[in-house]
Image: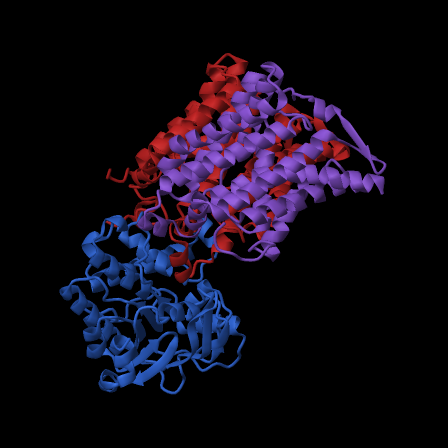
Chain colours: A purple, B red, C blue
Amino acid sequence: MQTFLEQILNGLTLGAMYACVAAGQALIFGVARLINFAHGDMFMVGAYVFFLAFSVAGLPYPVAVLVAAIVMFGFGGLFERTIVRPILDKPWHVHLIATLGASIVLANLAVLIWGTTPKQVTTSYSATILEFAGFRLSLQRVILLVVTLLSFYGLHLFLERTKTGKAMKAMSQNREACAVVGIDVRRISTLTFAMSCGLLGLAAGLVTPLYAIFPTMGLGLTFKAFAAVIMGGFGQVNGAIYGAFILGLTEALAAGYIASDYKDAIAFAIMILVLLLRPQGLFGKKIGI
Amino acid sequence: MSKEKSPYVYAALSLALLIALIALPLVLKSGYLVHILIATGMYTALALSYDLIVGHVGLLSLAHPAFFGVGAYAAAIAATRLGTPFLAAFVFGGIVAAGLALLVSFPFFRLAGASFAIGTLGFALIMQLVANNSIPLTGGPLCLMGVPRPRLTIPPLLDWQVSSTTEYYYLMLALLLVVVALCSRLTTSRVGRAFISIREEETLAMASGVNPLKYKTFAFVIGALIAGSVGAYYAHYSTVVCPSDLSNYMTTVLVIILFLGGVGRMRGVILGSIIFTFVPEFLRIAATWRMVIYGVLLLVTIVRMPEGLDGMLTKTLRRFPFSGTSARGPENDQR
Amino acid sequence: MRTSARPRKRVPRPQTSPQFKEARLRETTGKQGLIKPTDWKGRVGMTLLETRGLTKKFFGLTAVDSVDINIEPGELVSLIGPNGSGKTTLFNCMTGFLDADGGKVYYRGGDISDLPAHEIALLGISRTFQQARIYRRLSVLENLLMGVQEHQGDSILDRILRTKKLNRLEKEAIERAEELMGFVGLTHLRDQPAGNLSYGQYKLLVFAAALMPDPDLLLLDEPAAAINPTMINKMKDHMVELNKTGMTILFIEHNMEVVMDICERIIVLDAGRKIAEGAPEAIRNDERVVEAYFGR
């Protein structure tokens, strides 16, 4: 029972990480109809930024996380302006090649700068172990879960209640109509990217103390996030989040009970199954995000 | 555009090129240079097979390194564990890769465009995982070693023990010539025309009676067959096969070769292969730096001139691959 | 310059012989002992194309609502109706580009409802699209060749090995392409990339490409749309001529002059339902039709 609960917790942590990546991926896809192959690599960049802020510059933990989020926010916006905007109306293979190129550049620059050895970060929270109900978990995990869930709730409120958020939802349903009505589609596009990357930065700051970071972690993350997005139904943010948690839980349970080497294959298997059996995603069909 | 070259001029040029290629390693004294030539040859064959899938049919597959790796491992395992002679192991490697491609084509071709790309990416990642973790089968991160040097025996004509770099070069050259001939034949035939019809306007192709699934599968499987064969050759050349041989480095290079060399056009692909394999190797640019440069190049090209891609295609295809006939030769000359 | 697609002299045609078509039909619809496929003049008595209760819905919107249509061999029929009445959707369901939600489609008595589009194309049904689709990067000649190469029964091996059979078939295909280029008047553009053509020339190319496999049933989606009056007349003449030689034509059209001028029968759709059917005079005065077009 103990192991089971621990695995559940692992799964939730993993799921939270995947969900942050997947939610951003879904947002970007919804608003810009673009699959960002570099999304996982941006997470990696965020992780290294956090590393610089925390381990190298010695900033206090919350500040370092914030720094990572803000830097990535800017980075996302910049990325959109320079790379995405010129190709937004081009066919999908252009998007793919462009973001793939970005992914390659980011990953390999990281290798050049930091080498291939994974980096570990320890915070006081990851070192603090809470004990209750007979099992142990690090405080860091709790913080991760709490903060991400709050962020998702905040995102939900943003999309439902604020003008900009609603504009984003509208754009994901019908971009042309939005332009006609006077919504600044380009500004919203940039903001969407910025927000998605900011979320990545935040997540990176929370997750890095738990897992090691290395330059080539991006592509695998991109893939898993995409699997979650597919599970949730293309472009639905909520669905992507649920899908990510399901993925995280399945991976953790499989790793614990079957074979830990092949757990990365689970995302692939799930994705194929969903695409074959229920291509509209597990969570029903809604138009837009 | 330019007048159709006389078939005799064409034949003469080809012969001259062939002689030059055969003479090359004898002229270049450096074994290292010949090694680079071999690598270039491998990448050319890989790029041509990749172009079948990506350039001609229009499927952006990211799974090519997986097929290469599967072919390499299959041949290596056959050669080391079962003592299979080179030719059989070579064929085996190609067939295993092709079979795998056939298998995954069923689920993957249900996916459109970018989803297909992601699916193939996942497949490539999984194959890397398998290579790393099936220790009894592949030796895992410690690699599969001890692949014997090829010995081609076709009694009573041939008994050739390949050992020197130059001999490997000639083996590679033979393989490359077969691949070039096959791809060239394929793309200038009705099959190639069907490929293009699928790439350009799939709906219209269906209305013309083209079965997209049949042709997509065909291109995918042949592409994998070639990639697997090159992998089998590679296994016998380097005598060691490691999981890192399935890395996405190959995908990057192939994508660059295609999109900067010339998608869908054989001369462009070959030229691209030479530029993006020979030159960096010759200049001994580190792999990581190469990737950064390639990535930036890709970004710049695709962002600065996204029509450039389409435009390049239009420009390079201005001289039509078929010119009204599917066979070369005086009897088909229309004018 | 040729003015007829069906020459009086017997020119070797691509191998879409009646035997070949019959064999294909039997293979794909599984029915034995079908009546022999139509010859030049068509055959009275066997409905060529029939739909029964064909229905198609999109997210709760019913685009095609239980439509019954019969097309007899040799007819020249027009399908009309206001925008959004489901005409193109009906075409798509009949030709395998969309899966119907209800009802059936029959071709020469065989059930083709579940056949994929490319197989239906091989049965002798040719269709065009509303947005003129052509292969822009291929030449006019190659566009036409594409229209027939899958119908000739050559195998992949034939193609790779360039067997005698393939060379012969290719030659026949080229001859037929040249014949059709003459018919529509595009011979001077033979080797031009199709993307360079004017819109009117596009439509002629599309028309010619649809004729390449010598279909028994031709489905045209707005053949007279967005072209100048001279071209429209040309198109009308071509259609009438082809029909005279026995080709069955069903076409969607908005241009009422063309419709009233050349067809023998008109089918009217409105909001997915068939609301009227009959001779041009009857339709012209039918109040349901008038209401559908003007009364809303």
Taking A31 as reference, is C186 left or right?
left
Q: Nearer the viewer, residue C251 or B335?
A: C251
Where does residue C27 sit, x and y in percent of width and height? 52, 71
In this image, A162 relative to B122: left or right? Answer: left
Which quarter of the rendered picture does the N terminus of chain A lie within? top right
Which of B103 and A46 lies nearest the eye of the viewer?
Answer: A46
Question: In which quadrant of the rendered view does residue C11 lie?
Answer: bottom left
Residue A1, placed above or below residue A275:
above
Q: Position of residue C284 (x, y in %)?
A: 23, 83
Q: Residue furthest left?
A: C230
Q: Is residue B104 visible?
A: yes
Residue A52 is drawn in which quadrant? top right
Q: Is residue A223 visible?
A: no
Q: How many dots with numbers?
A: 0
Which residue lies at the image location 25% right of the left edge and 87% below the top edge? Answer: C282
Q: Which residue is nearer to you in this view: B66 or C188?
A: B66
- Residue C28 lies left or right of residue A210; in this view the side is left
Residue visible at 79% across and 38% down in the picture:
A6
Residue at 69% over, 37% down: A13
Q: Say above or below: B101 vs B242.
A: below
**Residue B186, image x, y percentages:** 44, 45
Looking at the image, which residue sits at the far top?
B29
* Most foreground residue, C75 or B193: C75
Q: Position of residue C79 (x, y in %)?
A: 31, 75
